[in-house]
Amino acid sequence: MIRVVLPAHLRTLAGVRGDVELDVAAPVTQRTLLDALEARYPMLRGTIRDQVTGQRRAFIRFFACSEDLSHESPDAPLPDAVAEGKEPFLLVGAIAGG
Amino acid sequence: MSKVRVLVGTRKGAFLLTSDGKREQWDVSGPHFAGWEIYHLKGSPVDPDRIYASQSTGWHGQVMQRSNDGGKTWETVGNKFTYEGVPGTHQWYDGTPHPWEFKRVWHLEPSLTDPDIVYAGIEDAALFRSTDAGQTWQELPGLRGHGSGPHWQPGAGGMCLHTIILDRSDPGRMYIAISAAGAFRTDDAGATWKPINRGLKSNFMPDPTAEVGHCVHHVAMHPSRPGTLFMQKHWDVMRSDDAGEQWHEVSGNLPTDFGFVIDVHAHEPETIYVVPIKSDSEHYPPEGKLRVYRSRTGGNEWEALANGLPQSDCYVNVLRDAMAVDSLDSCGIYFGTTGGQVYASRDAGDHWAPIVRDLPAVLSIEVQTLP
């Protein structure tokens, strides 16, 4: 099971507490992970990536294993530790505001 | 006894204020969608418990919500707004072409006859319609495509379609307004549109009387006078008596004719309300005195309504969708401020009192008069 940590607004929107656990068929990539996340929680469609272009929203970052994966290809394999469920995949809202 | 429900959209959530017909004691529910910007909520005229809401943040974009029980519970509905065809370009602030990009929903207007039909005015300016209670949205492309779209330019708040007026007497007729393009009318249910800006004069434009480019802030219409429109423009309060074919200024003795809101009394179609704001760079009331101005003559002759409103050191703004009226016998007037106050008058503006004082900045107000 892959663990996903959502930012607070999206936990509220999806009606979940704590981490989300997902079954994602190999290969585990940003795209397959987010496809699985949106299939489980359709209300999240459009809140992480654009529904038409599939591009990550500007103020969302993807972190895992202490790395910023935001600029990796959406089809690049995620780290083994994420695919094996040892480390979470974090969706982070960029610091914004004042 | 009748009830009143005030739907308040704010920078950090939605609030529902309810009272019986006396409008003395209010229950406050919220924040709904805490932390999100709620640009607008509006209920269906035929099923008042059906309410649509526009929810957004800079992080997560647009979410659409629907309630079927008067705002007690909500469910997310479709949030995919895709322009028809190749979107093309409009003008950017510097006059260069800029691609049309969806940003948010500014205004929701439920159908007068079918609770599953609702219109959405969006930024970048376009009109969308849902016929399945918000699950899916389709653009009415005749508006952007009528010819002047490439010349539209955003106002300071973005290029938003903020006003949608449906005509109960003519199902094919609809009015919309865009900052900063102007007002438009369709007579064939949205298939084709025409600009209706003749008589407007905007000195910030190279041609102050051009067909499009005017920064219309809000338009109001009384249902019993569907050809009579009242407009608060960037500067100037305007009136048309021929469905927008020609406008004339009715600013009269207002202390300033800049402002955002304009609305019409529920039972007196010649009684209108504005909140004058000092200027386009000083978005607060003149002299620090919050005053609603009422005209009982459809414009030109205005009286200040200040009883119960702060008359010193008040520097809030009242945004374009933040005034509404109820339809009780003694018409109630409501408006919200960027300081988080929602003021109500139970006697058509003669006396005012705050319902709430400390909400986040108010973006929109709608009122439902319930049986």
Image (cartoon, coloured by chain):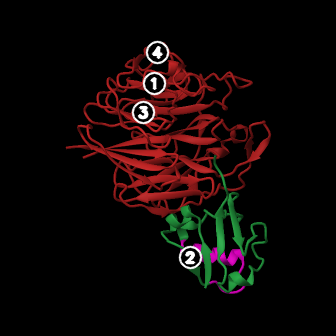
**Image quadrant in which you'd find residue B133:** bottom left
Q: Give the quarter of the figure containing the N terminus of chain B.
A: top left
Question: Badge 3 local density, few (<14 within 10 Å), some, or many (20+)?
Answer: some
Q: Which residue is mark 4?
A: B300
Judge left or right: residue B10 versus residue B148.
Answer: left
Residue type indicated by callout 3:
Pro
Task: Tell me the CA gap for discs 2 and 1.
Answer: 49 Å
Task: Tell me the CA gap for discs 3 and 1.
Answer: 31 Å
Task: Tell me the CA gap for discs 4 and 3.
Answer: 20 Å
Marks 4 and 3 close (CB-CB < 8 Å): no
Mark 3 residue element: loop
Boundaries of the magenta span = A24-41
Question: Badge 1 local density, few (<14 within 10 Å), some, or many (20+)?
Answer: many
Marks 4 and 1 close (CB-CB < 8 Å): no
From this viewpoint, which residue is outermost toward the front? Answer: A66
Residue B360: % across, % down: 49, 43
Residue type indicated by callout 1:
Leu
Residue B117: % across, % down: 45, 55
Q: Are marks 4 and 3 on the same chain?
A: yes
Q: Hue of chain B?
A: red
Q: Residue at x 68, y 38 (%)?
A: B154
Judge left or right: residue B152 versus residue B48.
Answer: right
Q: Which residue is mark 3?
A: B226
Numbered badge on residue A20: 2
| Chain for disc number 1 | B
Q: Which residue is mark 1?
A: B290
B115 lies above or below B20:
below
